Each structure stands twice: as structure tokens, then as C-alpha cells.
Image (cartoon, rainbow, N blue to C red):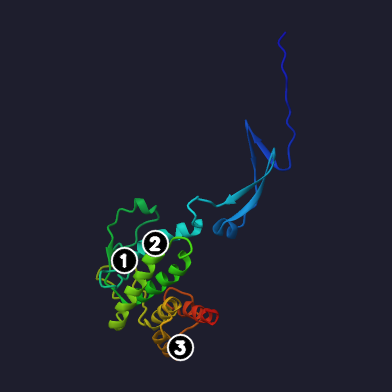
Amino acid sequence: AATGVEIIVDEDENFVRDGNDIYVEVPLSVADAVLGCKIDVPTVYGDVELNIPESGNGVPDILNECRYELELILKMQTSDGGVYHKCTSMTHTGFLMPEDDPLPFITTPVSSIATADFAATCALAYGVYSDFDKDFADRLKAAAFKAAKWLEVHPILVFDEPKDCTTGGYGDLCDLDERLWAETELYLIDKDVKRINRINIYLDMNLNFTSLGWMDVGGFAALCVLSLCYV
């Protein structure tokens, strides 16, 4: 007569068996997942140290992700240093993946608001990337100072949404907070005393120094001013 053997596997407090595979769940916080960390992962042969995350290129993975956006905004700078206010379709598309968006895109005219934000962002990113990717950091630095030169010779130039474009006019009619933010971030790089003079002038103005928004960026400038105390 035929005989068989039934194997019963007891449940384990750490591992889950699925066929020939064994799985384990390890808690990981959002901060650790984004910033990277080392965790001990239990295995049937003992704990193994795992690097989360690790792409292997010597640059923190969060900076690899940020670079995608930075590469995009670098393309928004014109040859004279100004920056197109935004890249947009004429109307909002539906809820779909970016690669499936069928609408053509346009670049809107240059604005002093976008140019100042660009200068501040690139200057800030320069300081972050300097320790990991000098060539890319130098690109950011050059773009930031090119934008700053443009701002020196151009007065306020607000964004005027093109006719028939319905993706948002934003309504930001003041570029002083953006210029202040740019001056503070640039000063951290070149220590030009002229920037201190301009920073003090902006600080005496009735600007919002606590907002961390897309319209009012005075809070970012204030954080940078506070950091100057430690430079």
C-alpha cells in the first residue's frame, strides 16, 4: 500500500513560510527609509546588517532623487540667466501617470520671482551636493550666480499667465522675499559684504519672515539668516 509523510511546520514569531521561501518583516520608519540607515535583519542563520537604501554610487539615495528635479529646473534657465516661470500644459490633464500625459507643454515667460527662487535653490543645493558630487555642485553654483547677475540688472518682473492658459496665475506680485532668500543663500557661498547690505535692507521691510510656502518664501530666508550666526 502507498504511504506518505506529512510534515507540519510550526509557526515562527519572526518568519513566514511561503512555499520554498521564507519572509520576515522588519519595521522601518519613513525618516530612515528616506534618509538611509543600517538595520539588523533576522535570518535563519542569524542577523544580517542591511543598508537601507543603497544605490552604490556614493551619493545618498535621497540626493539621487532630488537631482531629477534639480536637473529639470536647470533646464529652465535662459542663456542670459533668467528663468522661465513654469513649464506647463495649457490646461490641467487628468489623473494619470506623467508618461501618459498627451498634452503638449509650453514654457511661460521669464519672471524675477522664478529667477530668485532658482538662485536660492541652486545655491542651497550647491552646499548639499558639494561633499558628494563636486561636478554637479559646481553646475548648481554657476547657475545660481548667473541668475543672481540677471536679478541685479532686472527690476521686478511678475508672472503674467498667457492667454487661454488655465493652470494657475499664482497671484504673487512681490519678489522681495524671493530676492532676500537668494541673497542669503548666495552669501553663504561668496561672503560678499554687498549681500549683507542688501539683506539688511530686505529685513527692514514688511515681509513675512515665517512663511514656508510657494508664494511667500520669507521663512526660508529667515532660516538661512539664522544659519549665518554659525558661519
Residue at image position (30%, 75%) is 111
Q: Nearer the viewer, mark 2 or mark 3?
A: 2
Quadrant of the snapshot with the N terminus: top right
What whole-number distance in Å separates the C-alpha atoms at marks 1 and 3? 29 Å
Q: On the rendered structure, is 162 left or right of 32? A: left
What whole-number distance in Å separates the C-alpha atoms at marks 2 and 3? 34 Å
Query: Vertical placement of 103 versus 170: above or below?
Result: above
Query: Vertical placement of 24 versus 168: above or below?
Result: above
**Which element type, helix, strand or loop, lies under badge 3?**
helix
| Residues under numbered marks 2 and 1 in contact, where contact means CB atoms less than 8 Å apart | no
Q: Quadrant of residue 32?
A: bottom right
Q: Where residue 120 sits: x, y (%)?
A: 41, 74
For badge 1, the amino acid type reads Met
Residue under pointer 2: 135
The answer to whether any part of residue 154 appears in the image is no
Q: Nearer the viewer, residue 221 or 16?
A: 221
The disc at residue 221 is none
**Which element type, helix, strand or loop, lies under badge 2?**
helix
| Sooner in the amino-acid sequence: mark 2 or mark 1 | 1
What whole-number distance in Å separates the C-alpha atoms at marks 2 and 1? 19 Å
The disc at residue 76 is 1
Q: Where residue 144 sits: x, y (%)?
A: 36, 72
| Sooner in the amino-acid sequence: mark 1 or mark 3 | 1
Q: Where residue 171 sits: x, y (%)?
A: 36, 77
For badge 3, the amino acid type reads Leu
Q: Nearer the viewer, residue 50 or 172?
A: 50
**Which element type, helix, strand or loop, lies under badge 1?**
loop
Q: Residues within 10 Å of mark 1 (few under 14, many from 20)?
A: many
| Sooner in the amino-acid sequence: mark 2 or mark 3 | 2
| Residues under numbered marks 1 and 3 in contact, where contact means CB atoms less than 8 Å apart | no
Residue under pointer 3: 203
Q: Where residue 186 sits: x, y (%)?
A: 41, 77
